[in-house]
Amino acid sequence: MPRAEELSQDEVFEVLKSPRRRYALYYLRREGGETELSDLTEQVAAWENETTTAALTTEQRKRVYISLYQTHLPKLDEADIVEYDRDAGVVRLGERAGDLNIYLGEVSREEFPWDRYYLALVGVSSLLVAAVWLEVPPFGLIPGLVLATVILVAFGVSAVVHFLKFRRGGEVGTPPELRRADGQEH
């Protein structure tokens, strides 16, 4: 089956004018393109209400579920942006979802685990310092100033790379409007 025409600019803006539809698309993209309607509902409601999924009220969930079920997902399905299986309660990115990438930004890539990287760097540095201090061969032959320089260079280069990645693309994985509304990824 040939691919449908690209969405017109008017269609794109009509689809993306609703934050609820944008949040649904962000979540689908981040989850690999497929999710249960219940999971989608919870995350969209949490983002809208600036809370966690665990802190949502039944009313908040219900309000989002009804609008996704009756309005937003059918509209996205009609435009072939999602495939919405009401009976199975499953939502998948559709054939034309890629047409929106330029408007939504890249959210599907994994974010580099900087926190774990820096913890590992501290761990390795601590082991090296201990080995030099205890004069464990061959580390005992390394002068303290050389070791300090190596550790400082490792942290300095890491910090520069981290800074440049952040400046170029922000936090990959969470769209700016979600970071503003939510403050963290779920």
Image (cartoon, rainbow, N blue to C red):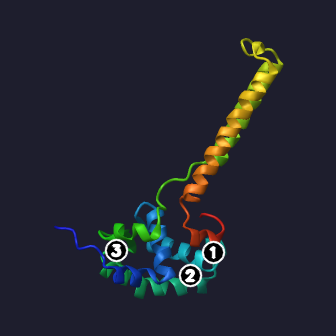
Cα distance in 3D space between marks 2 and 1: 17 Å
Answer with left or right where residue 29 lies relative to residue 95: right
Which secondary structure lies at badge 2? helix
Name the amino acid type tagged 1.
Answer: Ala
Which is more N-terminal, label 3 or label 2? 2
Residue beneath disc 1: 181
Instruction: Answer whether residue 174 is visible to the viewer in this image.
Output: yes
The N terminus: image quadrant: bottom left
Percent coordinates x, y for residue 82 in the rendering: 35, 73
Instruction: Answer whether residue 93 is visible to the viewer in this image.
Output: no
Which is more N-terminal, label 1 or label 2? 2
Outermost residue, left side: 1
Answer whether labels 2 and 1 touch (C-beta < 8 Å). no
Q: Would you call the spot at circle 2 few (<14 residues within 10 Å), some (14-19), or many (20 or more)?
A: some
Answer with left or right where residue 182 lies relative to residue 145: left
Residue beneath disc 3: 81
Residue beneath disc 2: 61
Q: Nearer the viewer, mark 2 or mark 1?
A: 1
Which is more N-terminal, label 3 or label 1? 3
The residue under the point 46% across, 69% down is 104
Name the mark on residue 98.
Answer: none
Q: Nearer the viewer, mark 2 or mark 3?
A: 3
